[in-house]
Image (cartoon, grey):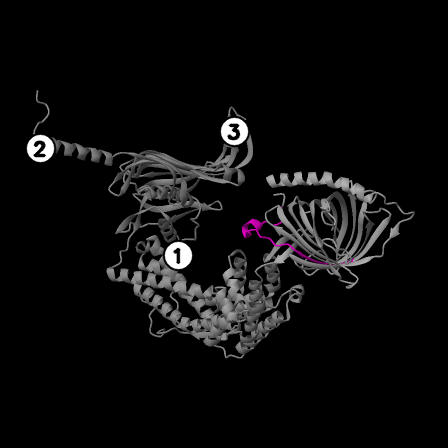
């Protein structure tokens, strides 16, 4: 019987392995989280299982995340959500449910059994389906319902799509209160055959005819008048496969609206339903991507023309888009500048410049902005050079020379820097780049002139603000009620008067200064100085009250057995006398005779601190100090004895 | 305590002896048909009153009075008549009520220039007093009941002590003149009336020892020091004959002082007796 290894080395090795596996096992151990969490913009109560791998948290197993707030529901309305599903190795795997609600309640509760029941009214949204490796698989149903008193009143939207490994299959249905869209796909997810929108009145209102991903024509009717328009009549080669998204919708409307056909409105009908469906998928995709998976797409695919740009044109396009973005920002900044809007009323040059910017904006920046939009939607390369030019400049290319008409009806010509050399008529990207550069340079030039005007105005504005503040301060400073002023002693009143006259002197000195940076600095300085003066005035006005307060504080109640009455007895008379007869007169004299902006703050503080010190001294053992204070008339010595010397200096 | 008992025993002993003597002294006195009023004498009193606070409720009542009376040679201020040493332990029951109990050693000087008897004799008293104060508008009024047990002797050699009880009631007001209450710097006027009754075996008929009517003007220097001066008219039956009344006009000068010898921390709060 020798089952166990006996050699010491073997035992050691075995122990190490056991420990290693144990550690590895613990490392793999599933933990549970339960509590408040937020994923993206959603915040609520989460419960999920996870394990730690290195520094990563890997979701593993069940997951629920929800929020509902009864208080919010009863008070106003409540935004609720409930998300439940499963993870495997950090990737969504299994049945998932997403529910969103916007509810309010009439607050009428019923007690059924031992439960309170409350009816809610609002909108409920639900998405349900299976996710395989984060991709939709099988049937996904999304619906949006109108709820009234906890009953379904109406279906606002629904969508049912079959997926196989993230690719939509066979047919789908998307509908809303007006109608239902039915369509088919090829196995690879490309749109195929007729996509038909049936109105709820059960007749066909719009058909999109696809062949192998190409949208060939659209049959629809406007105000009951049927029409057919071709979209991609030719099989473009090369072509590219793209998602049926907003970009594609734009592309369709550009192609469908080519000059030969009448204008049609694609914002309703099939297009609207597709956009609605797309946004619902997007909503779920946003949540799932917060949870670490971004493969949830409706995956409708179509074919579109492709006119690839060479690397030079691509570069030019990128530069154009960048310049345009900056130019739009600059122009918008000026056109929406409230100060410029004011200045242009009184300044003719500013007026002209303002209208120049407006003209640059409408003539050049709007088309370039449209180009930027196409690029952002990723469809620039689906338009031929000619189509692009016609789309951007339906009335032809603009001239660099603009006629500017200002508010007064005066017309002026504008030609930006290098305007006589630019060629806006060239083909393709170089022309757009030239326009973008021309606008940018023109705007830069205007910016210099206008910037100076705005800067001057800014300084002017600052003066106005500072002076307003100053005047407000001065007005507030001299506002003490008569009753307060009447209590002041002559010395106090003289000090207060000096603050006033000093203020006036400073203001008139300021008023005589020439406008400029120095004056601006002076204004800022004065404001802080006036604040100090004001604080100083407040201190002086407080003196009678404080003296009364101190008198009370420094009074003891003494029982006299001969009269059987309680009499007030002043205590620590040397301290009160030093404060009242030496310190306060000294400070008041300083205010009266030596007041200036630099010392005002310190003086103000000295008033405050000396009073606070007096309050403290009442409670302290001051016998030694009182001895030293005997007959002391020198304020500096008193300050030293009061421990206020540092403040004074 | 032992001493007190001893003293009490002595007092009781003296009491019995003296009462016999007093009877004898009054024998043969006959009441006149109508009361006789002697000519008023003038006197000057210098009184100091101390009330020294020793604890929250107790104070030491220390009074020293110097009483002068006219003589034929010095008509007005006269010569020293009595020196009072009045001491007691006072108890502040409340702001308005206090009691005290103590003793008096009065030194009587013989003012009779023709007398060959002793010049100085002591007089002993035990006294207790009950004072009730009451504010009336801005003034204060006081009722003072003072009971004294006194042992006196004449100036004659070997004269014996006689024992009497004195029953005193004083009514006094202190009315501030320049202020709305009695406080530092206040001048006040103080009218007072006191009747002093006496009883004892030696007292036959002369129950009203003294009736004192005084008006004083005082000034409060600080809550702990005040001074006062006043004029008193008094009359009372003589012990020898109840039909004879003596009269006095007395000028009184007072100093009142009330120091507090407690430590600062014990002084606070100074006024709340009922805490």
Q: Which mark is residue A507?
A: none
Say which of marks 2 and 1 sits in front: 2
Say which of marks 3 and 1 sits in front: 3
The residues bearing labels 2 and 1 have C-alpha atoms spaced at a distance of 89 Å
Mark 2: few, some, or many residues within 10 Å (few <14, many ≥20)? few
Q: Which mark is residue A116?
A: 3
Q: Is residue A546 above or below residue A505?
A: above
Secondary element under disc 3, as helix, strand or loop, is strand
Q: Is residue A460 visible?
A: no
Q: Which mark is residue A9?
A: 2
Q: Is residue A332 above or below residue B3?
A: below
Instruction: Magenta stretch: give its range.
Output: B250-272
Mark 3: few, some, or many residues within 10 Å (few <14, many ≥20)? few
Q: Position of residue B18 (x, y in %)?
A: 74, 41
Q: Which mark is residue A259?
A: 1
Point 28% across, 34% down: residue: A30
Q: Quadrant of residue A374?
A: bottom left
Say if mark 3 contacts mark 1, CB within 8 Å.
no
Q: Position of residue A578 (x, y in %)?
A: 56, 66
Residue B263 on the magenta segment: yes
């Amino acid at each position: 019987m020798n089952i166990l290894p006996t050699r010491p080395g073997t035992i050691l090795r075995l122990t190490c392995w056991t420990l290693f596996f144990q550690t590895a096992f613990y490392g793999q151990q599933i933990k549970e989280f339960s509590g408040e969490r937020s994923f993206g913009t959603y915040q609520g109560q989460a419960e999920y299982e996870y394990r730690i791998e290195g520094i990563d948290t890997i979701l593993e197993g069940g997951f629920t995340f929800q929020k509902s707030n009864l208080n919010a529901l009863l008070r106003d309305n409540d935004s609720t959500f409930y998300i439940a599903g499963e993870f495997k190795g950090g990737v969504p795997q299994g049945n998932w449910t997403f529910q969103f609600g916007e509810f309010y309640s009439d607050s009428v509760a019923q007690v059924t059994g031992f439960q309170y029941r409350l009816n809610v009214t609002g909108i409920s949204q639900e998405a349900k389906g299976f996710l395989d490796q984060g991709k939709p698989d099988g049937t996904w149903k999304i619906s949006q319902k109108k709820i009234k008193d906890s009953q379904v009143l109406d279906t606002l939207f629904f969508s049912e799509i079959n997926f196989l490994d993230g690719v939509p299959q066979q047919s789908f249905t998307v509908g809303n209160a007006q109608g239902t869209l039915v369509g088919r796909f090829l196995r690879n997810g490309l749109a195929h055959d007729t996509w038909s929108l049936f109105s709820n009145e059960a007749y066909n209102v719009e058909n999109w005819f696809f062949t192998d991903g190409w949208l060939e024509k659209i049959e629809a009717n406007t105000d009951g008048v049927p029409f057919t328009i071709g979209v991609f009549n030719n099989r473009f080669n090369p072509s590219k496969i793209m998602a049926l998204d907003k970009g594609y919708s734009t592309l369709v409307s550009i192609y469908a609206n080519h000059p030969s056909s009448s204008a049609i409105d694609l914002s309703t009908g099939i297009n609207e339903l597709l956009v609605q469906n797309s946004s619902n998928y997007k909503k779920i995709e946003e949540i799932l991507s917060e949870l670490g998976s971004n493969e949830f797409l409706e995956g409708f695919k179509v074919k579109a023309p492709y006119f690839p740009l060479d690397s030079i044109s691509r570069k030019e396009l990128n530069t154009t888009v960048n310049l345009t973005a900056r130019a739009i920002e600059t122009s918008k900044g000026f056109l929406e500048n409230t100060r410029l809007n004011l200045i242009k009323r009184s300044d003719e040059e500013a007026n002209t410049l303002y209208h120049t910017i407006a003209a640059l904006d409408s003539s050049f920046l709007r088309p370039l902005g449209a180009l930027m939009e196409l690029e952002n939607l990723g469809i620039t390369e689906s338009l031929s050079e000619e189509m692009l030019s016609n789309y951007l400049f339906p009335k032809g290319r603009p001239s660099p020379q603009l006629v500017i008409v200002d508010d007064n009806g005066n017309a002026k010509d504008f030609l930006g820097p290098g305007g006589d050399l630019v060629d806006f008529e060239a083909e393709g990207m170089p022309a757009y780049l030239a326009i973008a550069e021309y606008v940018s340079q023109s705007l830069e030039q205007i910016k210099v002139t206008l910037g100076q005007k705005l800067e001057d105005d800014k300084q002017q504005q600052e003066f106005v603000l500072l002076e307003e503040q100053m005047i407000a301060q001065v007005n507030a400073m001299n506002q003490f009620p008569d009753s307060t002023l009447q209590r002041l002693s002559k010395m106090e009143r003289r000090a207060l008067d000096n603050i006033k006259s000093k203020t006036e002197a400073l203001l008139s000195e300021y008023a005589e200064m020439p406008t400029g940076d120095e004056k601006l600095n002076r204004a800022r300085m004065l404001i802080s100085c006036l604040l100090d003066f004001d604080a100083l005035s407040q201190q002086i006005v407080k003196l009678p009250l404080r003296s009364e307060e101190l008198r009370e504080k420094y009074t003891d109640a003494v029982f006299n057995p001969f009269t059987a009455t309680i009499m007030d007895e002043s205590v620590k008379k040397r301290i009160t006398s030093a404060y009242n007869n030496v310190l306060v007169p000294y400070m008041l004299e300083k205010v009266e005779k030596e007041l200036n902006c630099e010392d005002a703050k310190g003086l103000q503080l000295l008033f405050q601190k000396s009073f606070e010190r007096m309050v403290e001294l009442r409670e302290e053992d001051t016998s030694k100090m009182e001895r030293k204070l005997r007959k002391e008339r020198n304020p500096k010595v008193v300050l030293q004895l009061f421990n206020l010397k540092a403040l004074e200096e | 305590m032992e001493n007190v008992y001893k003293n009490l025993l002595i007092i009781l002993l003296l009491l019995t002896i003296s009462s016999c003597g007093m009877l004898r002294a009054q024998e043969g006195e006959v009441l006149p048909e109508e009361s006789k009023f002697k000519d008023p004498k003038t006197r000057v009193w210098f009184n100091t009153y101390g009330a020294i606070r020793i604890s929250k409720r107790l104070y030491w009542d220390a009074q020293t009075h110097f009483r002068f009376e006219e003589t034929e040679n010095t008509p007005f201020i006269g010569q020293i008549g009595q020196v009072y040493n009045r001491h007691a332990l006072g108890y502040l029951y409340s702001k308005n009520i206090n009691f005290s109990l103590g003793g008096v050693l009065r030194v009587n000087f013989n003012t009779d220039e023709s007398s060959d008897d002793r010049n100085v004799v002591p007089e002993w008293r035990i006294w207790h007093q009950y004072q009730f104060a009451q504010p009336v508008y801005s003034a204060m009024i006081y009722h003072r009941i003072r009971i004294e047990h006194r042992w006196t002797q004449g100036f004659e050699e070997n004269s014996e002590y006689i024992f009497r009880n004195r029953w005193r009631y004083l009514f006094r007001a202190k009315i501030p003149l320049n202020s709305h209450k009695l406080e530092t710097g206040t001048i006040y006027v103080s009218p007072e009336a006191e009747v002093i009754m006496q009883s004892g075996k030696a007292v036959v008929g002369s129950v009203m020892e003294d009736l004192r009517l005084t008006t004083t003007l005082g000034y409060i220097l600080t809550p702990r020091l005040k001074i006062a001066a006043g004029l008193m008219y008094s009359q009372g039956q003589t012990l020898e004959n109840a039909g004879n009344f003596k009269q006095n006009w007395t000028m009184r000068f007072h100093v009142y002082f009330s120091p507090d010898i407690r430590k600062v921390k014990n002084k606070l709060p100074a006024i709340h007796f009922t805490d």
